[in-house]
Amino acid sequence: MLLHALSPAMTTACVGVIGCLALLSTDLRPKGLSPIDGHYQRMVESEFEANAPFRDVSVHFWTAARLALFNQADTDVIIGEEDWLFTAEEFRRASSEVDLETELSRTIEQLSALGITLIPVIVPDKARIYEDMLPHARLYEIELRYGRLKTLLADYGFPVIDLEVALRDGRTSAETFMRTDTHWSPAGAEVAAKAIAAELSDMHGDTAAFETTTLQAVLFEGDLARFLETGPFATWIGPQPEAIAVPETTSTGGADLLFGDPTIPIALVGTSFSAREDFNFAGFLSQHTGLDVINLATIGEGPFAPMRSYLASETLKSSPPSIVIWELPERYISVRETP
């Protein structure tokens, strides 16, 4: 038979296709329902997984079948062009009830009392930077959100660091976001750091030297790809894996400038965009500002909780920085919180 002449992986894929066809031809489909009907899809998925002897294989099979037959994924993931994946959060209104202006006012008051300069930086949605890869348009009010946030920051007297322009322009030389992940790529993190450093150039004096080296590229499992695990079917169905060359930044001189003064030049507060070492955002900030950066960003808490924790911390009281950079992903901020 043909299957015997194929590789094990190809055999598995063929069996999967045959299984799909078999499912479509059985009595599982109630009369009057189309194979592409959503109710039919959910019913077949439940029946298949409930009766399959090997659950992991069945999950991989159904995910692959759903992608191949319906071009649908988990409800938390939006499938775009050329295997680009997007979080569904960027297509919905922010669920947070936090009022940005209240948080800004509180933060400004506390930091100003200590003589610390606050620099809020809005990270635009991946869907905004890669709108050409989207399967459909987003809500009009969501498209307006980033511009309204820039206006809000300007009204408060902050320098408006436009990462939308920087990250879009950066695409001419490298992808500024990871294809299968929510976050920016190392190239995008460096583009953002350069844009911020340009705004900070007049806010500090002595600097030190930093350099960044890049490690050998390794396979990278994006947080969005985890919702689309297709196991042995990935080669044919996708999503295709991607690689990342992780950068590392070290000081190469001027150590007396960094450690002779107990004041920390920059404190970085924010989310996983800043906290994850894969992207080296804090390192790139040091490289392009020439200043030491203490990274206080956290993963999984959004942008507001880390700042509240920092404002209440002994770290702020005992080692106040000159500048606090507050990284805020756009998708966490509701339109109704802006003018």
Image (cartoon, rainbow, N blue to C red):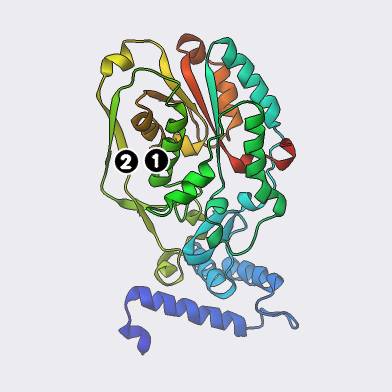
Residue drawn 43% across the image and 49% down it: 170
Q: Amino acid at mark 1?
A: Glu
Q: Is residue 32 left or right of residue 47?
A: right
Mark carried by residue 120: none
Residue drawn 66% across the image and 56% down it: 138
Q: Which residue is mark 1?
A: 190
Residue drawn 57% across the image and 56% down it: 77
Residue 259 visible in image: yes
Front-most of residues 24 and 303: 303
- Mark 2 or 1, nearer chain start: 1
Classed neighbour count for the residue bearing mark 1: other residues with Cα under 10 Å, few (<14), some (14–19), many (≥20):
many
Residue 70 on image: x %, y %: 59, 72
Residue 186 on image: x %, y %: 39, 44
Identify the residue at the far left of this view. 252
Q: Which residue is mark 2?
A: 247
Q: For the residues labelled 2 and 1, say whether their Cβ atoms are less than 8 Å apart.
A: yes
Tag nearer the camera, 2 or 1: 1
Identify the residue at the far front of this view. 202
Front-most of residues 4 and 78: 78
Q: Amino acid at mark 2?
A: Pro
Residue drawn 75% across the image and 82% down it: 32
Residue 206 on image: x %, y %: 34, 17
**SS class, disc 1:** helix
Residue 104 on image: x %, y %: 64, 25
Q: Is residue 237 left or right of residue 220?
A: right
